[in-house]
Amino acid sequence: MKKIIVTGALGQIGSELIAKLRSEYGTDNVLATDIRRPQSPTGGPFEILDVTDAKRMHELAKAFGADTMMHMAALLSATAEEQPLFAWNLNMGGLVNALEVSRELNLQFFTPSSIGAFGPSTPKKGTPQDTLQRPTTMYGVNKVAGELLCDYYFHKFGLDTRGVRFPGLISNVAKPGGGTTDYAVDIYYKAIEEGKYTSYIAEGTYMDMMYMPDALQAIVDLMEADPAKLVHRNAFNVTAMSFEPSEIAASIRKHIPTFEIDYAVDPVRQAIAESWPDAIDASAAMTEWGFKAEYDLDKMTEDMLAELKVKLKRESEAS
Ligand code: AKB
C-alpha cells in the first residue's frame, strides 16, 4: 500500500490528483500539502508546506511514513515569464528539495514535465520522445533542467524517478493559473456564462491537450508500471488531442449552436504557444507502460459542458 505525499495539492492537477489517489490508495494514505490553506477541507490529511523549505518537507514526509513523493508545485509558463528569477527559485529549488527528501527517505518519485520543455527548433509535428530541446521560456528551461535532474537522481542514486511531459490539461474542477494553454479551459466557462469567448491565442495555433481524467490515470499507471519495462523513466510524451481555437469552438457549437469566438491575441502567450510543438508523439509511453487516453475533443467537450453547467448553477445558487 502506498503512502503518498503530494506537494502543490491545491493546484489544477493536485486538487484532482489527491481525490484520485485517495480513492485508489485510501484517504489516510495521501498527505496533501500546499503553501496556502484550502478554502474547504480536502477530505483527508493536509499540511501547509512551502516547497523551498527542505527541512519541513523532510519532517512532513518522515512523520507521515511516506514511501512516495508526487511533486506538483510549480509556476506555469506565462507567470514564469513575468517573474523569471522567482520561477527559477521556486521551480528548481522546489524540485531539488523534493528529490533530496526522496533520496534521503528512499521514496518513489513523480514530477510532471511539460510540452513547454520543447522549443522553436524542436520538430513541430509528431515530436519524438527524444529530440532537440532548446526552449526559449524560463518555464521551458526549468522543465528541461528538471527532466535531466530526475534522470540524474535515477542514474546516480538509483532513485525510482518517473514523469511525463503533460500537454495543456483541461478540467472542470480547479482552474489553471498562469499557463499558456489555459484558454482551452476558460472557453468552456465563457461558453456557458456568456455564449462567446475572446481568445488570447490566435486561430490556427495548434497545441497538444488532454482531459484531466486521462492525465490522472496516466500518473497512476506510470507509477504502477513494471520498472523493468521502462526504457525512459522521466518526461514521457503524453497527449490525447491537438487542436487550435476555432476547432474547440466548433466542438462547443455542437452543444451551443450560437456560441461565438473572436480573437484579441496576447503577444506573450502567443509567442510561447508558437515555440511549442503542434502535436507530439506519445508512442514511447504507449509501448513502455501502456499509456492510453479515453477522451478526444468531442467527448471531452460533452463532459466539460455537462459538468460545468451543474457546477456553475450550484455556485450561483449558493451565492
Ligand atoms: C502551461 O500552459 O504553462 C501548462 C503547460 C502546457 O505546461 N499548461
Image: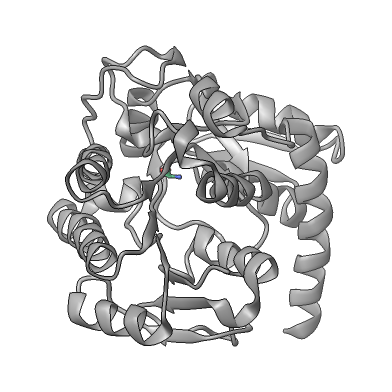
The residue located at (80%, 58%) in the rendering is 307
Q: Determine whether, in the image, residue 202 is placed left or right of residue 271.
A: right
Q: Determine whether, in the image, residue 57 is placed left or right of residue 201.
A: left
Q: Determine whether, in the image, residue 72 is placed left or right of residue 214.
A: left
Q: Is residue 42 above or below residue 241?
A: below
262 vs 66, nearest the viewer: 66
Q: Is residue 205 visible?
A: no
Q: Residue 187's x, y, as percent?
A: 64, 45
Q: Residue 138's x, y, as percent?
A: 20, 43
Q: Residue 314's x, y, as percent?
A: 80, 75
Ligand 1 appears in which quadrant?
Answer: top left
Q: Is residue 248 visible?
A: yes
Residue that extends furthest to the left in the rendered view of this protein = 85
Q: Which image quadrant is residue 214 in?
A: top right
Q: Is residue 244 above or below residue 175?
A: above
Q: Residue 123's x, y, as percent?
A: 36, 12
Q: Determine whether, in the image, residue 12 is placed left or right of residue 188.
A: left
The residue located at (31%, 64%) in the rendering is 106
Q: Which image quadrant is residue 131 in?
A: top left
Q: Is residue 164 above or below residue 63?
A: above
Q: How many marks?
A: 0
200 vs 47, nearest the viewer: 47
Residue that extends furthest to the front in the rendered view of this protein = 228
Q: Is residue 97 above or below residue 202?
A: below
The residue located at (17%, 51%) in the rendering is 84
User: In the picture, which quadrant includes the C terminus?
Assistant: bottom right
User: In the picture, which quadrant includes the N terminus?
Assistant: bottom right
Which color scheme is applied?
one colour
